Image (cartoon, helix red, strand yellow):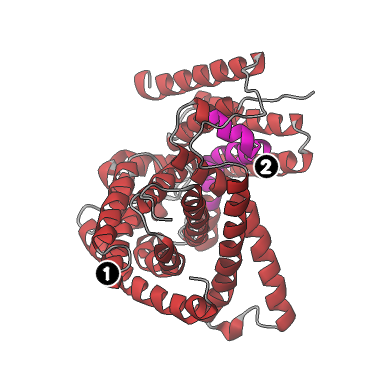
């Protein structure tokens, strides 16, 4: 099964999930809504054939939920328990947003994203910058991994325990490579006519499909239910 | 390039530095789950750690709008990562003011850049905004959201409407210090290498 979602639907999903994430779930019903909303991006990840990450997120979320519900409570004290409570709380609370964001970033092609933003009349500055930010996180990770490898090879991974040195040894090379990549990126972008005067056309034809409408309606209904039962009918 | 308008190259620069800034922030933000006092300590750590990429960024800023757009992006990312939209106006406002201050110095005057960076760092305090404005319900949310009551209590002892002024001032001051430090690092590593 292949589901190709419109980037606009994905953005809407991010918006809704981030909003829901900020409101804590207090009753079993609210938790149900929340868990269902978390499962949707996981299912979408499966539909995109990203089984490994789907499984990873699923396990992480389930473990956090189970721990939160059965083993921990607000008055658990002691360092380990407090740490664990905090950690599980964070995971249970914010992982939905992270999963959704991860799904969107990983499955949206930059050109799709750009043309969707263009259709929504977002200013070019924001569109381009955001697209670069999206594309750049994996790059930073890669660069950082190779910097770490290089440090290990030279035996300065811990920099003799000097924290400032540790920071410097990591940050400076990272900045160097990022600046260089940035220059290459802008050269590539200008070649493709980014930032020109004319309106850019796009190869991808964006179209809302049934799946899009279903998801939008589904998420809207879930939000209405959530807000209603949290604030109106306590 | 003598145009006043921002070009694609500028936008890409903004994107890159926002990504770096965010990674730095995220790395330090994770520490906050260890102890609430570290959350209050962001005002010291983030301006210092973020200063190096920011000073490099400032050296590339030439036109009005770049810092503003960066603050808009930070606001968006903050929202997406679940930190709320309450702080967003402050973030963007801090960005615009920082941009204006740097503009007065023509984006080259180092004193103005220092002040501008200090103002820009105010956005870090915007993260505390929900803690202060909606203190009671936020506390409830934290506890229900799985934080221990101990954590919540300590967090509110460290951050409330009485301490926010102090935190804000500390934040700006460390922004100034960070700017000098960052500039020194940029000079040591980047200007010598001819990258700036």
Q: Mark 1 lies on which chain?
A: B
Share a chain, discs 1 and 2? no
Q: Where is residue B82 in the image (x, y as percent from the top left)?
A: 46, 41
Q: Name the residue under label 2.
A: A57
**Disc 1 from disc 2: Cα separation:** 40 Å
From this view, report whether residue B19 is shown above or below residue A39: below
For residue B157, side relative to residue B28 (left or right): left
Q: Mark 1 points at which residue?
A: B173
Quadrant of res B118: bottom left
Would residue A226 be visible to someone looking at this image?
yes
Mark count? 2
Q: Does the magenta stretch include residue A98?
A: yes
Q: How crowded is mark 2: few (under 14 residues within 10 Å), some or many (20 or more)?
A: many
Which region of the structure is painted magenta? A87-116
Q: Position of residue B78 (x, y in %)?
A: 44, 45
For residue A205, side relative to residue A20 (left or right): right
Most prominent secondary structure in the magenta stretch?
Answer: helix
Which residue shows up at 36% across the image and 40% down it? Answer: B140
């Amino acid at each position: 099964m292949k589901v190709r979602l419109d980037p606009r639907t994905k953005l809407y999903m991010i918006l809704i999930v981030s909003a829901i994430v900020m409101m804590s779930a207090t009753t079993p019903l609210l938790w149900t809504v929340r868990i269902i909303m978390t499962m949707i991006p996981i299912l979408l990840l499966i539909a995109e054939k990203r089984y490994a990450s789907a499984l990873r997120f699923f396990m992480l979320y389930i473990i956090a939920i189970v721990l939160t519900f059965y083993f921990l409570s607000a008055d658990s004290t002691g360092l380990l328990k407090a740490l664990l409570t905090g950690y599980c709380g964070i995971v249970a609370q914010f992982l939905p947003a992270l999963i959704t964001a991860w799904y969107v970033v990983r499955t949206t092609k930059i050109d799709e994203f750009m043309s969707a933003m263009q259709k929504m009349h977002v200013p070019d500055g924001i569109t381009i910058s955001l697209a670069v930010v999206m594309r750049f996180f994996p790059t930073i990770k890669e660069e950082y991994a190779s910097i770490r490898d290089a440090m290990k090879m030279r035996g300065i991974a811990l920099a003799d325990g000097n924290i400032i040195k540790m920071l410097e040894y990591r940050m400076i090379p990272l900045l160097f490579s990022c600046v260089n990549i940035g220059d290459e990126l802008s050269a590539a972008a200008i070649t493709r006519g980014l930032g020109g005067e004319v309106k850019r056309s796009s190869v991808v034809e964006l179209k809302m499909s049934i799946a899009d409408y279903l998801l939008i309606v589904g998420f809207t209904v879930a939000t209405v239910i959530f807000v209603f039962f949290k604030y109106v009918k306590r | 390039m003598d145009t006043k308008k921002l070009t694609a190259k500028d936008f890409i620069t903004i994107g890159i530095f926002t990504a770096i800034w965010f990674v730095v922030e995220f790395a330090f933000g994770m520490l906050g789950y260890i102890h609430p006092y570290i959350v209050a300590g962001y005002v010291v750590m983030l301006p210092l750690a973020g200063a190096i990429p920011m000073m490099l960024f400032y050296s590339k800023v030439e036109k009005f709008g770049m810092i503003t757009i960066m603050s808009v992006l930070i606001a968006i990312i903050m929202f997406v990562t679940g930190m709320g939209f309450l702080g967003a106006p402050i973030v963007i406002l801090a960005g615009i003011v920082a941009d204006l201050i740097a503009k007065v110095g023509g984006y080259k005057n180092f004193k103005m850049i220092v002040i501008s960076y200090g103002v820009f760092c105010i956005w870090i305090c915007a993260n505390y905004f929900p803690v202060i404005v909606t203190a009671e319900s936020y506390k409830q949310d934290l506890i229900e959201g799985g934080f221990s009551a101990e954590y919540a209590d300590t967090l509110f002892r460290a951050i409330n409407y009485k301490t926010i002024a102090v935190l804000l001032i500390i934040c700006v001051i460390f922004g100034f210090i960070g700017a000098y430090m960052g500039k020194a690092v940029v000079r040591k590593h980047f200007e010598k290498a001819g990258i700036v």
